[in-house]
Amino acid sequence: MKPGTDNSKTLLAEELERRFSRRGTLRARLRRAVQVLLWLGVVQTTSLGKRAVDMGVALLLGMLFLPLMAPLWLWSKTQGKGLARSPRLGRWAVPYREWELTLPDTRLGRIAAMLHLNAVPALWNVVRGEMSLVGPRAVAPGEVSLAEQLVRRRHNVRPGLVCLWWIRQRANIAYGTEAEADAEYVDTQTVKGDLAIVLRAIPAMLYGEGIASASDEVAILGMRINNLTMDETLDALMAWADGDKPRQLCFVNADCMNIAFRNAAYREVLNRADLTVADGIGLKLAGKILRRDIRQNVNGTDLFPRLCATLDGRAGSVFLLGAKPGVADAVADWIRERHPAVRIAGTRNGYFTAEEEPEVIRQVAESGAQLLLVAFGAPRQDLWLAEHLPQLGVRAVMGVGGLFDFYSGRMPRAPQWMREIGMEWVFRFIQEPRRMWRRYLVGNVVFLWRVLAQRLREG
Ligand code: UDP
């Protein structure tokens, strides 16, 4: 639900705000009592350990930042800014005021804001027990309805300076909704988990945001990228499946860009594909460097379960072509188990001879599949699809690289926390260093170097 769109909603928040704003000694006493309880952490639904860590770390950080913040505050005061407090809703929708340093719109002010120094005074809210270091995002009164508070289960914990959703947005992997991320956090939180989230917030800060200003199409190293989110890509695929002609989706990551740099045929396929989407943290960084923000990391592996869920809802069908013998069948089992309404139109491994190729194409064409996933690795899969698109008779096709290996259980995928810090490639490198060292250790540097050169050329 969008803020302020539903007037009929009874806001627990507004109700509490009204009650608290009535003057009188009862209100003052009540408020003090709640605060003392919160401060002590006695009525915690979470552990006292979390409260102790919050308090300890907030005090420590506060002391560390003081020598930096004091002059910054004085400077911002001379510019007509300074400290401010904004109304927020805390745990159980109890209102509090969040401290922040307002910064003038000058170069120094912008740098300080980029480093999030404006949020440092909120450490005081943490010390007071109104906030946590980690928790769902603090919302203003009226921003989230009671119903949504309940869905998010956020009413049971203190809002945090850092939240899971914020980190995922910055790593470009904020699929789903903020409410789901909140609920996931509340259901799984531990003190150790919180510390890990704080650590993950450090690279997240560097990745920056910028989704709002992104355009629909961006050019990176001469390649056209369709700047879509995961949901937009899914919508496009579904529209294709119902459409009248075959269309191809390509995922490009930093490695694909390097291959395209020296392989003209592949470059042409990517530029001619109906959609080419940005996969991975390398493209996000490239977008950042070139001031063309990439909206989301749209990769096959994260798209796949969402695609299956969508197909499940409309009894769609899919053909799985590629990987070693037996692997595509294991992926088919994965789909059948979770999405029984999806029809597996066919499976076939990706090791066939030139003589067998017409037979493979015939098998796909006769399967009646709406979607075709091909896992031969880049660039072969994309070149092969582009070449045979008219004969394949499938309206939505895409090359998916190592996806079948993940979903068949043949290869483990990087844990969520590694993806949140943009380090999935490190995991893949460790799994197969001999095959991957050139792709990642050399390839990433070469790619970023070319991007920097483009930026310098563009001035
Ligand atoms: N593969 C295939 N036929 C071939 C060569 C490779 O089906 O002739 C498969 C291989 O088994 C693997 C996938 O293609 O499942 C390529 O995986 P890789 O990890 O290289 O893909 P990436 O995601 O890195 O593009």
Image (cartoon, rainbow, N blue to C red):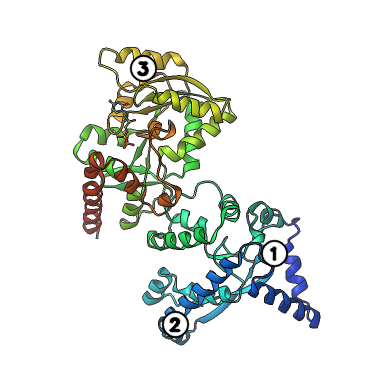
Determine contact: label 1, label 3, CB under 8 Å.
no
Residue occupied by mark 2 = 66
Q: Residue at x 63, y 58 (%)?
A: 154
Residue 213 makes an appearance in the image: no
* Separation (CA) of disc 3 from disc 2: 68 Å
Rate crowding at label 2 as few (under 14), some (14 to 19) or many (20 or more) other CA atoms within 10 Å: some
Splitting the image into four quadrants, where does ligand 1 fall? top left
Is 6 above or below relative to 61? above
Determine contact: label 2, label 1, CB under 8 Å.
no
Is 448 above or below relative to 331? below
Is 19 above or below relative to 198? below
The image quadrant that residue 324 belongs to is top left
Residue occupied by mark 1 = 92
* Separation (CA) of disc 1 from disc 3: 60 Å
Q: Residue at x 50, y 41 (%)?
A: 231
Q: Is residue 105 left or right of residue 442?
A: right
Q: Is residue 443 left or right of residue 298?
A: left
Residue type highlighted by circle 1: Trp
Residue type highlighted by circle 3: Gln
